[in-house]
Amino acid sequence: MTVVKIALLGAGTVGTQVARLLSEQKEDLAARSGAQLELVGIAVRDVSAPRDPAVDRSLLTDDPESIIDEADVVIELMGGIEPARAYILRAFAAGASVVTGNKALLAAHGPELYEAAAQADVDLYYEAAVAGAVPVVYGLRESLAGDRITAVLGIVNGTTNYILDEMTVKGLDFDEALAKAQELGYAEADPTADVDGLDAAAKCAILASLAFHTRVSIDDVHVHGIRSIAKADIESAGRSGCVVKLVASAKRRPEGIELHVGPTLVPLDHPLASVRGAFNAVVIEAEAADRLMFYGPGAGGAPTASAVLSDVVAAASHKVDGGRAPRELIYGDIPVLEASRGRSSFQAEFAVRDEIGVLTKVTGVFAAHGVSIRAVVQTVGEDGLARLTVNTHEALQADLEATLAELADAEFISEVHNVNRVEES
Ligand code: NDP
Ligand code: HSE
């Protein structure tokens, strides 16, 4: 049987599980790929650090280049931009295919990597880069290649979904929930990427490029993280029959592509509302297929390793039988819309003076800026203030911002609380 040499770059949360599965499933993987998969080395920063027994210490090296140069397939699970980018380019130059879970790198340098893989006539696979074990990259790139996608809407960051879920269900505060997500191996090495929405934005860019066949980078995505979400926001969402989720949204509008990542109120009857813990879900709307949902574990060592191994089987079988991974299908040039041209329904909460005529004044400001109100709920507060919750119909972000700017200065408003997007069911 042909031997396909594998170099593994990284033996952290995911790399360790990949090493374990390569060993435990050796025979099945050989039968499926048509090749003996031989792990020739595992590159880490610190070869003397304690490791899970699944990692064969005799394979450890702190010289990644030495194992890249002898490999047929390089698995990059180090993370970060450099030196991961340089190692992947080196692998292509040496004729090796690459499997990676590095969404940050793909969202920033995808075109360069695709180009280098094409030049070298080798594969670049990255199923693990979006939604862990969930085969949404394959689904978009291959299963839906015959359809026209109109929207991709997802919970694509396990850490933030876990944090919001723990805050909602167990009443934990933000820091406690983040510490638990880190212990469970969901968070990035620097969890800022998770909580500030950048990890979800990278995934949003990858999904949008696949869905709309137009080059989208992380810089095109308008991002808000979850740091500003407090228990009060979660309780307020609950009163409106919603849960707060970090939603990545890529929508094809007549005038261009709208890309947004941010805390969103999701009605309880929406399919994304029931996504719990570190699970991910991606809802895809396509003209012919209609609405599909991909769902499953979105982070963690073993689930992510499952996606990595599926790519390794594909890349190894190409080494045996010939053939290539699907090429990058970028042929469109749809403009990406400025944040101000985005559209959504919104919910805003205000503390207002509880006096005759204030409600009319507030709703008048919305009307003056062309923002249509769907519902208003007023509850009596303390100190002569009332709490006003305003839900709008779909409105332009720019019009909503103009409304809020005027209200923030109005003498009858005491405070503007968090303003969030609302996803319609
Ligand atoms: P970890 O931080 O747990 O592991 C990183 C590994 O890479 C470590 O073994 C580290 O060595 C090694 N490494 C880092 N820099 C270098 C370097 N310069 N030279 C050699 N080795 C290096 O990361 P994860 O396993 O969590 O993530 C890996 C990749 O997978 C990232 O791109 C991440 O975004 C992605 N991913 C992660 C998921 C998850 O749930 N964790 C899910 C989906 C994708 P050492 O052990 O010595 O420190
Ligand atoms: N940190 C990422 C998350 C890992 O929490 O979703 C999976 O990509």
Image (cartoon, grey):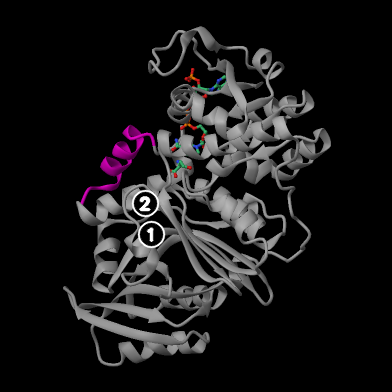
Residues under numbered marks 2 and 1 in contact, where contact means CB atoms less than 8 Å apart: yes
Where residue 200 appears, as percent x and y from the top left, is 50, 50
Where residue 419 appears, as percent x and y from the top left, is 40, 68
Q: Is residue 101 placed above or below 327 in the rendered structure?
A: above
Disc 1 residue crowd, few under 14, some 14–19, many 20+, Cα 10 Å: many
Please indicate, yes or no, whether residue 412 appears anywhere in the rendered image.
yes
Q: Is residue 379 placed above or below 86 in the rendered structure?
A: below
User: From mark 2 to mark 1, how far is it between C-alphas?
Assistant: 7 Å
Residue drawn 69% across and 75% down?
Answer: 255
What residue is pinned by disc 2? 161
Residue drawn 47% across and 37% down?
Answer: 306
Residue drawn 53% across and 17% down?
Answer: 44
Magenta part of the protein: which range?
171-185
Q: What residue type is labelled 1?
A: Lys
Q: What residue type is labelled 2?
A: Asn
| Helix, strand or loop at mark 1 | strand
What residue is pinned by disc 1? 245
Where residue 227 appears, as percent x and y from the top left, is 38, 50
Residue drawn 49% across and 10% down?
Answer: 47
Q: Which one is nearer the viewer's eye here, 282 or 333?
A: 282
Asked whether mark 2 lies closer than 8 Å to ligand 2, one says yes
Residue 178: say if magenta.
Answer: yes
Q: In which quarter of the image is residue 259?
A: bottom right
Could you tell whether 403 is left or right of 89 in the image?
A: left
Q: Which one is nearer the viewer's eye here, 393 or 49?
A: 49
Q: Is residue 420 placed above or below 6 in the rendered structure?
A: below
